[in-house]
Image: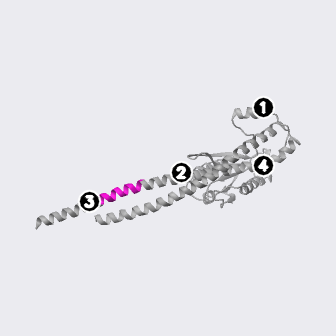
Amino acid sequence: MAGAGVKLLNKRIRSVKSTQQITKAMKMVAASKLQRSQGRMLAARPYSRKLTDLMQQLADKADIVHPLFEVRPVQKRLYLVVASDKGLCGSYNMNVLKLAQKAVDESVAEGVETQVYVVGKKANDYFFKRGYTVFEKHIDFGGEMNSERGRLVGNTAVDSFLSGEFDEVRVVYASFISTMNQRSLDLPLLPIAPETGDENMEEDSRSVDYIWEPSQSAMFDALLPLYLRNRIFMTLSEAFTSEHAARMTSMSAATENAGEMIRSLTIQRNRERQAAITSELLDIVGGANAL
């Protein structure tokens, strides 16, 4: 019986070691993707902040009317939900999806016709299985962001708003704070609302008096598409960076847990083996005494 126990423990140790190798490899892949995604996101942030500042200056000082700023009575609402295509990233998907489901349910309870625009296979499966109306889906991004994908998602959201198909578009995603911390957010996307931020930054922005060439209206028309495209790009970039960070953290924890399990099983196997040896020695000594 003891020998069978040792063999079973050896088999389990080998199995855990194989799993540990897989989680370690996945951690390294996620770390590599995180480095690339975070680098692109951080490189784009100064441009995004400056573009937002210019748009705020135009919106505050120019007498400009644009359909994307039109606030209508909300009878139809669209939620853009950004999750991952794959799992094994801890509570990342569930935090985003639970927040999105709560927001959608509250919208429906208000009597607003609500649909979901999903980015990520996990989000599509989650809402489809629960009977929610999926307006559009992208389930092949694989956590990789580029300008074409940002333009695709942005154009779909903007067209649905301009056509009157929806009166409001909101986005639910995970904002990247640090490698260990990602925060799920529910923010308005359309109509475009004035940005709120740091008071000191706003005071510095108001103190700058821009000279607009050729005119404020022309600059507004030129910058607005760039602003929307950049906002979608940054939203998806933060969401995908959060995904890679969550997966790396999860796989790192899994690798460490596997190591702890291997050590525990090794100690248990050694004890079983020692008990078997002791039992055999006692049998030999007892047999010798009987002779």
Q: Amino acid at mark 3?
A: Ala
The scheme the figure's colours follow is one colour
Dot 3 falls on a residue whose secondary structure is: helix
**What is the CA distance from the residue labelled 2 to the residue labelled 1?**
43 Å
The quarter of the rendered structure image containing the C terminus is: bottom left
At x 19% / y 64%, what residue is drawn? 283
**Residue located beneath label 4 in the image:** 226
Question: What mark, if any, has residue 189 been given in the picture?
Answer: none
- Residues packed near mark 1 inside 10 Å, few (<14), some (14 to 19) or many (20 plus): few
The mark that comes first in sequence, 3 or 1, is: 1
Report which residue position mark 3 lands on.
275
What is the distance, in whole Å, between disc 4 and disc 2 at their CAs?
Answer: 34 Å
* Three-letter amino acid code at the position of disc 1: Ser
Residue 65 drawn at (x, y percent): 84, 43
173 vs 195, left or right, is left
Q: Amino acid at mark 2?
A: Thr
- Determine the residue located farthest toward the left in the rendered image: 291
